[in-house]
Amino acid sequence: MKIGIDSRNIKEIRNGVIYASEVDLVEVGGKDFIKEGRIDWETLNKLSSLDTHFSLHAPYSSPTNENLLDLGTVREKNFKIMRGIFEAASFLGTEWVVVHGDRISGNPRKSFLHLLFNLKTFSKLAGDYSITLLLENLHKEKGWDRFGILPQELLAIINLVREDNLKVVLDVGHAFLAANLYGFDLMSFFDCLSPYIYHMHLHDNLGVPAEINENYGDQHLPVGKGKIDFGQVFDRIEEIQPKNLVLELKHVTRAEAMESINILKQLRDRQAKRVSRVLER
């Protein structure tokens, strides 16, 4: 199980607080290697020299930028971007690419069919590069509805696309916000999706959805600085053993980031010791 952090916190990439060599994996955001809609190969060459592994996060539409990848529509731009993403992933030697279910554009039923078509096509294309496509659960933002918020939605999408290399990245911060907004247990995500959770995004928040108060929402706090019960989360992580645990933190000090990294490393070490004891019996 690799312990990682997002590229906004990496010193060599965005002058962040963590050096790439201090984690097993860096999740590189699209904005770090896509310039004006094209892959920046000079940047990728620099990334390839770092002493770490990588996962890539494809660009996505948001309330502040609607002109990126949009899985609620079928357009050549989507496929052009994803081909470039897979080429970049192959160049860096990574097998993990994260995508969002994305917004509901216009007619929700048509948007859902577009989403399924896009994910089916992307999964087949990813297979040509021996890449696993990871579908991330989202949260509802004010005035901005998206697919893949509820665990049942992600399960339905996985079952309908029916491609072996389409799995789930469980974002615990997003899951907590969705659970609070719609009134269900955060652990439902694990109950529903455990066989498909290969990758996780970990960060904390106060559990107040932006739909209720836009000053809170998806805060990306260090582990333990919000209201998520990480004791429960860690118990489930030990059960399902995802491939990667990636911290996604915003506006943190080096000490805060290192504390979260060390918490995850201790979790991994504890699990390794348990496995070792079982093997010795």
Image (cartoon, grey):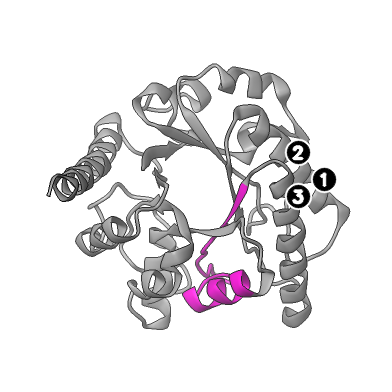
Q: Which mark is residue 212?
A: none
- Look at the image and tell me in which quarter the N terminus lies: top left
Residue where numbered disc 1 is placed: 80
Q: Position of residue 268 (x, y in %)?
A: 26, 43
> Which element is circle 3 on?
helix
> Which element is circle 1 on?
helix
Residue where numbered disc 3 is placed: 125
Residue lying farthest to the right in this orientation: 76
Residue where numbered disc 2 is placed: 84
Horizontal side of 277 relative to 244 (left or right) equals: left
Q: Taking 207 as reference, is 43 above or below it? A: above
First reached walking from the N terminus: tag 2 or tag 3: 2
Occupied quadrant, residue 108 = bottom right
Occupied quadrant, residue 11 = top left
Residue density around tag 2, few if under 14, some if 14–19, many if 20 or more, within 10 Å: some
Region in magenta? 132-159
Q: For the residue marked with disc 2, what is the amino acid?
A: Gly
Q: Position of residue 193 (x, y in %)?
A: 45, 69
Residue density around tag 1, few if under 14, some if 14–19, many if 20 or more, within 10 Å: few
> Which element is circle 2 on?
helix
Name the mark nearer the viewer: 2 or 3: 3
Looking at the image, which residue is at 39% across and 22% down? 21
